[in-house]
Amino acid sequence: MTDRPTPPLDASDAEREAYWNEFYASTRARRRPLPSQFATFVAGELEGPARIVEFGCGAGRDSIFFASHGHDVTGVDGSKAAVESCADLAAALGEQAEFVASSIDDPELASRLRVEPGNTLLYARFFVHAITDEEETAFLRLAASLTSPGDRLAVEYRTVRDASGAKVTGTHFRRFVEPTAFNANAVLQGFEVAYAVEGFGFAKYRQDDAYVARAVLVKR
């Protein structure tokens, strides 16, 4: 892949999709990936098999991890190349997981996602900071429409305090997020904050020790 800058968020959907398609087409995994620290944390909070929908599944590392531990998983990503790569990798590893290509603001997306009321977890790692303010609103509205009381939304994202830190993937767009504002918007959509923490050390990768927020929110 050429190391070209990410299109600005006011670029067309086609330009943004082309960037991510090129990125994921050039980084296809050939073996079982290690899960993120956040995925292992979330898995430890689950009492048994759950219905998990991951938004921004990317290369599929966390979706495949959840599937390998007996969860019923669908990964969603705006990049068709990412979704195709995820599906191929899951099949090669013998894991049962579904992958859907869609933008987060597609009005048809909710109808394409199966949920299990009372046992659904919506999961989004490093997705919130990769979308626009308007897409964040669409994401939270979608999360509210997919969940029932007791269902959970687990998110991890780069915060405003991470803006000046070193980045391994330096060309990726990042919209650094204020956790208080994000949580307040989630509350407006019917969630309550069950767990929230910020800091370094949660998502370290090589020299990139991101200052992140992670939260688990429960639908009221």
Image (cartoon, rainbow, N blue to C red):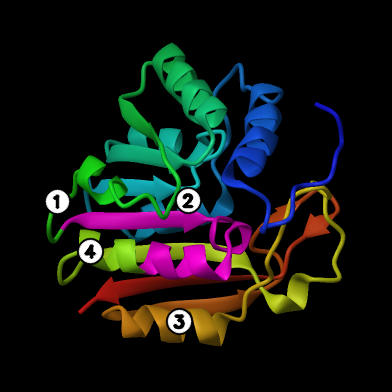
State which region is magenta: 119-140
Where residue 162 sits: x, y (%)?
76, 71
Disc 1 target residue: 116
Mark carried by residue 183? 3
Closest to the camera, between mark 4 and mark 2, is 4
Say which quarter of the image contains residue 189: bottom left
Mark 1 and mark 2: span between their CA atoms? 20 Å
Q: Which of marks 3 and 2 precedes in the sequence?
A: 2
Please tell me how crowded label 3 is: few (under 14), some (14-19), or many (20+) other residues with Cα within 10 Å: some
Mark 4 and mark 2: span between their CA atoms? 23 Å
In this rendered view, identify the residue nearer to me: 75 or 47: 75
Disc 4 target residue: 145
Q: Which of marks 3 and 4 precedes in the sequence?
A: 4
Mark carried by residue 100? none
Amino acid at pointer 3: Asn
Residue sitting at x 56%, y 26%: 81
Closest to the camera, between mark 1 and mark 4, is 4
Residue sitting at x 67%, y 40%: 15
Where residue 104 sits: x, y (%)?
43, 52
Q: In which quadrant of the rendered image does the C terminus lie?
A: bottom left
Q: Answer yes or no: do the residues labelled 1 and 2 have beta carbons within 8 Å? A: no
Residue 209 position (above or below residue 27): below
Amino acid at pointer 1: Glu
In this rendered view, identify the residue nearer to me: 69 or 28: 28
Closest to the camera, between mark 2 and mark 3, is 3
SS class, disc 2: helix
Mark 2 and mark 3: span between their CA atoms? 20 Å
Residue 128 lies in the magenta-colored region:
yes
Disc 2 target residue: 39
Q: Which of marks 2 and 4 precedes in the sequence?
A: 2
Closest to the camera, between mark 1 and mark 2, is 1
Q: Which of marks 1 and 3 precedes in the sequence?
A: 1
